[in-house]
Every structure is written in C-alpha cells, then in structure tokens.
C-alpha cells in the first residue's frame, strides 16, 4: 500500500506557509529561536531554524554563549530552503562577522532578500535587555555593509539605531535623521521601534523614504518584556510569509506584540517573557 492510500489516511491537504529564522537559542525559552518558533506557531506558520549560537541564559541575563561554525549555519539554511522552501525569513542574534558574511552570501545564493520573491527581515540584535552582548564588536560593520543591503525590512530598537548610525534618537528630527541614515545602508524599509522610549505610548515608525507609517499603541505597565523584539520581528515575518505587504505585515505585527506584552508573565527571578499564548487561547 502506498502512503496515503488507506481509507484511514489522515492529514491536512494544504501545508501552512513556511518561515525561516536564523538566530540564537535562548535556554530560558523567552527570546531568540524559541520566541520565533512560538510566534510562528501562534501565527499559523511552519517555522524552520538555522541556529547561529547557543546562549546560556535565564530571566536574570546571559551568562555565556558559544557560536555555531559558519558553515554549519549556512548548511542549515540550504537544507531547509532546498527541500521545504521559505516564504519569508528573518535574522536575530548572529554573533560574529564570519556568520553574518556567510549568511548574507547564502541568502543571496538561495534567492532570499529585498528585490526577490522572498522577503527578509533583519532584527539587528546586539545585546540582551540586561546589556549582555550578543554580537562581537567587529560584527556591526558586517551588519551595515553585508546584511542591510539585502534586507526587505530592518527593525532596530533605539540602542541598535545608535550603534548602527551613531545617532541618538531624542525627538522627531533625530528619529527622521536616523531613519534616513539606516535607509542609506540599503534596506527597503526601516522600522524604528519605540519600546525604549519614555511616555505613555509606544510608537514605532515605519518608512521606506516615501511612505511613513506611525504605529502607535499603549505602553503596558509591566517589567516582563523579554523577547519583545524577536516576537515582533517574527510576527511580521509570519505575515509576510502569508503574503502581506510590508506596511500590512508591520501593522499586524504591532497588534500582535501589543497583546503579547499585555499577557507577559513572570518567570524566574528576573524579567519574564512576552506571551503569544493569547492567540491560541482566543482561538481555542
Ligand atoms: N511596555 C510596552 N507596552 C507595549 N508595547 C511595548 C512595550 N515595550 C515594548 N513594546 C513594543 O514591543 C516591540 C519591541 O520594542 P522594543 O522594546 O523597542 O524592542 P527590543 O525588544 O528589540 O528591545 C515594539 O513594537 C514596541 O513598541
Ligand atoms: C538568543 C537571544 N536572541 C535575542 C535576544 C534579544 O531578544 P529581544 O527580543 O531583544 O529581547 P530582550 O533581550 O530585549 O529581552 C536574546 N536575549 N537572546
């Protein structure tokens, strides 16, 4: 008997869209690859992974990390894209310049990135929210020169904006200057996130230099925002994998992360993770 020919054959006839995350593992389960996979799952997308580094991490911070050899990172990308295909991809923690260079080249080889059919989101992770470094210092230049020119969208927080451009965002004018400086590095769209700003609203700004979209939401009063940036970038990537354009995907991602922050929970003695479980609860 051939597979699927029995009267009792089960299974969906349509596979969900696929999305690839290229990122580090968070042993605490709240950020990194783990946040990406639970977001993809909650958003109805089949998640695939290329692990770049293994962090020793919990709610109190990052104790250590070991990077994966660059050729193993790129072999993971080729294995899954060659067989299963990716409808969208994102990067998180990339750890070293060597990994960034190898990832950028491989994404070009497999046809992922701006001006291709497969959108690519760069979350330029440099440090954890505790201030622990997740990127070797010399690797910032590789993000600027090798990864950003391939990005459909880059999603820096205010610290990452400063690291990448040297501009401290303090008002609308400096935010505009930072966006222009980031666009000059080559991504199609820039989303400057406002989570590290102060005030009662969390305002993220999306721009491609022509279209400007302000994403304004309430600032929830919680210390538990671990994995927030990863979760937002993954939700946007999931929407892109389902066929949304960038402004629509970012609006959907912002609505998603707002609920995840509202439902964030304490875990361990430090900062707990944002939670995508609301999406599953609502639909159960
Ligand atoms: N307290 C909060 N309440 C509501 N939304 C938040 C809060 N903190 C962050 N966000 C949102 O979460 C996303 C991640 O933002 P940010 O904290 O700036 O990035 P990162 O987690 O990379 O440091 C953004 O969409 C931001 O507006
Ligand atoms: C393995 C790993 N990747 C990324 C991060 C940073 O995630 P982020 O969403 O920015 O969340 P915080 O670090 O701000 O909580 C990480 N910690 N670990």
Image (cartoon, grey):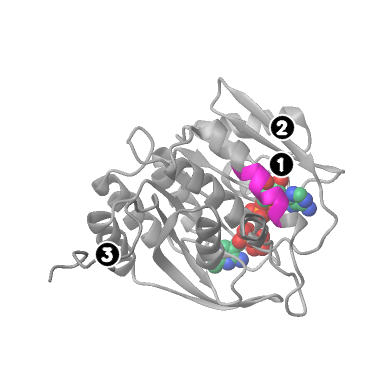
Q: Disc 2 vs disc 3: which is toward the camera?
A: 3
Report how far apart the C-alphas of labels 2 and 3 lie in the structure.
40 Å
Q: Is residue 222 visible?
A: yes
- Name the residue rendered at 33%, 36% in the picture: 117
8 vs 48, nearest the viewer: 8
| Image coordinates for residue 62, horizontal then vertical, percent | 62, 75
Q: Dot 1, how many residues are within 10 Å of its Cα: few (below 14), some (14-19), or many (20+)?
A: some
Ligand 2 within 8 A of label 3's CB? no
Residue 116 vertical placement versus 138 (above, below): above
Image disc number at residue 75: 3
Q: Earlier in the sequence, mark 3 or mark 1?
A: 3
Q: Is residue 257 magenta?
A: yes
- Report the magenta residues as a range: 253-260
Question: What residue appears at the point 59 percent right and 72 percent down from the top-left corner?
Answer: 29
CA neighbours of label 2 inside 10 A, class few (<14), some (14 to 19), many (20+): few
Helix, strand, or loop for circle 1?
A: loop
Left or right of 282, for residue 154: left
Question: Was residue 71 drawn as part of the magenta stretch in this picture?
Answer: no
Image location of residue 223, percent across then percent down: 80, 63
Q: Which secondary structure class fits the magenta region best?
A: helix
Query: Which residue lies at the image location 18% right of the left edge and 64% below the top edge?
Result: 5
Separation (CA) of disc 3 from disc 1: 38 Å
Depth check, front residue: 162 or 122 = 122
In primary-sequence order, the first of circles 1 and 2 is 1
Confirm or reject: label 2 Cβ below 8 Å from ligand 1.
no
Disc 2 secondary structure class = helix
Answer with mark 2 or mark 3, whichever residue precedes in sequence. 3
The image quadrant that residue 190 belongs to is top right
Which quadrant of the rendered structure holds the N terminus?
bottom left
* Residue position marked by numbered label 2 in the rendering: 174
Residue at the disc numbered 1: 168
The reply to whether dot 1 and dot 2 touch (C-beta < 8 Å) is yes
């Amino acid at each position: 008997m051939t597979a699927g020919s029995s009267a009792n054959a089960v299974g969906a006839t349509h596979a969900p869209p696929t999305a690839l995350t290229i990122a580090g593992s968070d042993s605490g389960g709240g950020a990194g690859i783990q946040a990406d996979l639970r977001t993809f799952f909650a958003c109805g997308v089949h998640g695939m992974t290329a692990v770049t580094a293994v962090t020793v991490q919990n709610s109190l911070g990052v104790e250590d990390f070991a990077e994966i050899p660059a050729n193993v990172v790129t072999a993971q990308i080729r294995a899954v894209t060659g067989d299963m295909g990716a409808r969208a991809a994102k990067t998180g923690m990339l750890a070293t310049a060597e990994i960034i260079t190898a990832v950028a080249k491989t994404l070009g080889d497999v046809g992922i990135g701006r001006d291709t059919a497969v959108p690519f989101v760069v979350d330029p992770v440099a440090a954890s929210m505790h201030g622990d470094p997740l990127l070797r210092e010399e690797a910032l230049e590789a993000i600027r020169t090798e990864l950003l020119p391939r990005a459909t969208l880059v999603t820096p927080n205010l610290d990452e904006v400063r690291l990448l451009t040297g501009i401290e965002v303090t008002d609308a004018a400096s935010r505009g200057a930072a966006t222009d400086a980031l666009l000059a590095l080559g991504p199609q769209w820039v989303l400057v996130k406002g989570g590290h700003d102060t005030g009662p609203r969390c305002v993220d700004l999306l721009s491609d230099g022509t279209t400007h979209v302000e994403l304004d939401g309430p600032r929830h009063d919680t210390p538990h925002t671990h994995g927030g940036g990863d979760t937002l970038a993954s939700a946007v990537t999931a929407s892109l994998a389902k066929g949304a354009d960038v402004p629509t995907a970012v609006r959907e991602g912002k609505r998603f992360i707002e609920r995840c922050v509202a439902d964030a929970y304490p875990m361990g003695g430090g900062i707990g993770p944002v939670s995508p479980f609301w999406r599953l609860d609502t639909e159960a």
